[in-house]
Image (tube, helix red, strand yellow):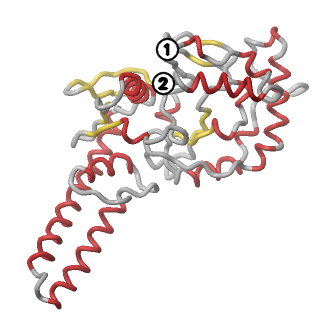
Amino acid sequence: MININRLPCPEVLNDKGRRETENVIAFYSNNQNLATPYQKPGTKQSYITYKDEQVRKTLTKMLNGKCAYCESKILSIYNGDIEHFRPKSSYTSSDNKSTKPGYYWLCADWENLLLSCPFCNQTHTHEIVDGNTITEIVLGKLDHFPLHDEANRLKKNHGQIFYTDAPSYRQAYFQEEQVRLLLKPCTDPNIESYFIYDDDGSILVNENMSTLDQLKAATSIRTYALQRLGLIQSRKEKIIQIKAQVRRVKEAIINFDNNYDQLTERTWFECILRREMEILQKFTHANQEYAGMARYIIGKYMTFEP
């Protein structure tokens, strides 16, 4: 997971999205509808605006065609899930209690949308690696949205003041943000610092953080299934490539140092060194798979701006 700069909101969410959200809020203002899936009045249509192609294209560009959570490239085999970070239809709390409706008023909210792969966003039976043990377990985000303190959770009534009482809503939203346990790439600063990586591709909690931050990292790893076997194997392959390139950089540094006093040779080996460094730096670019892991692994050997 890396920090992502959110692009400007697609216009369709400002007009059609606003109208749809107002309809949804009106639908759930009737208490008889609280356990009922939303349908646009007079139709069988549910939430549709977030699925607009303009939204998908903007999310794909913003995330470089990668899953927001595991950083895997997904577009070659799948078009990706448009994911509601705060679930719209229902939410599952830390105690696995499911509640309806969810954060219905954020159904077309740009800040609430991400692009995700199905393994992080949906539930599947995964082979999860824990040290030398592999366990089959059903994991994936789906409608999970755990908090450290349920007393601060936004309630269905907050949806009713989403447009009408912005200051009160923002205050309640801020309070919930303080106890949110899932990390969000477009919001949480220094998100890469929550994790460390083993050379076998495992993602681990950075224990040099506060207890709450460690809990956030552990909850995110589990909820997004970031320790699934196939993902670990893909990260390990990337680490092998990175370490091989680190060796080439070190060799280039040695050759440059050994020929520093000879102008012709120094210029030649300086060009080689620059080329090898550029190749190594490319692993850290935001459009590359597992850039967060690459920055951590490379950072153990040298420091430079990604």
Check disc 1 and give the amino acid type. Ser
Residue at (33, 46) in percent of width and height: 293
**In the current view of this chain or complex, which residue is farthest to the bottom?**
264
* 8 vs 291, nearest the viewer: 8
Which label number is shown at residue 94?
Answer: 1
Q: Mark 1: few, some, or many residues within 10 Å (few <14, many ≥20)?
A: some
- Residue 47's x, y, as percent? 75, 31
Q: Is residue 16 left or right of residue 110?
A: right
Residue at (15, 87) in percent of width and height: 265
Q: Secondary structure at mark 1?
A: loop
Which label number is shown at residue 171?
Answer: none
* 191 vs 17, nearest the viewer: 191
- Residue 269's x, y, as percent? 19, 80
- Examine the image and state in which quarter residue 166 appears: top right
Q: Secondary structure at mark 2?
A: loop
Considering only vertical position in the picture, is 89 above or below 100? below
Mark 1 or 2: the one toward you: 2
* 102 vs 296, nearest the viewer: 296
Image quadrant holding the C terminus, namely bottom left
Q: Which residue is mark 2?
A: 181
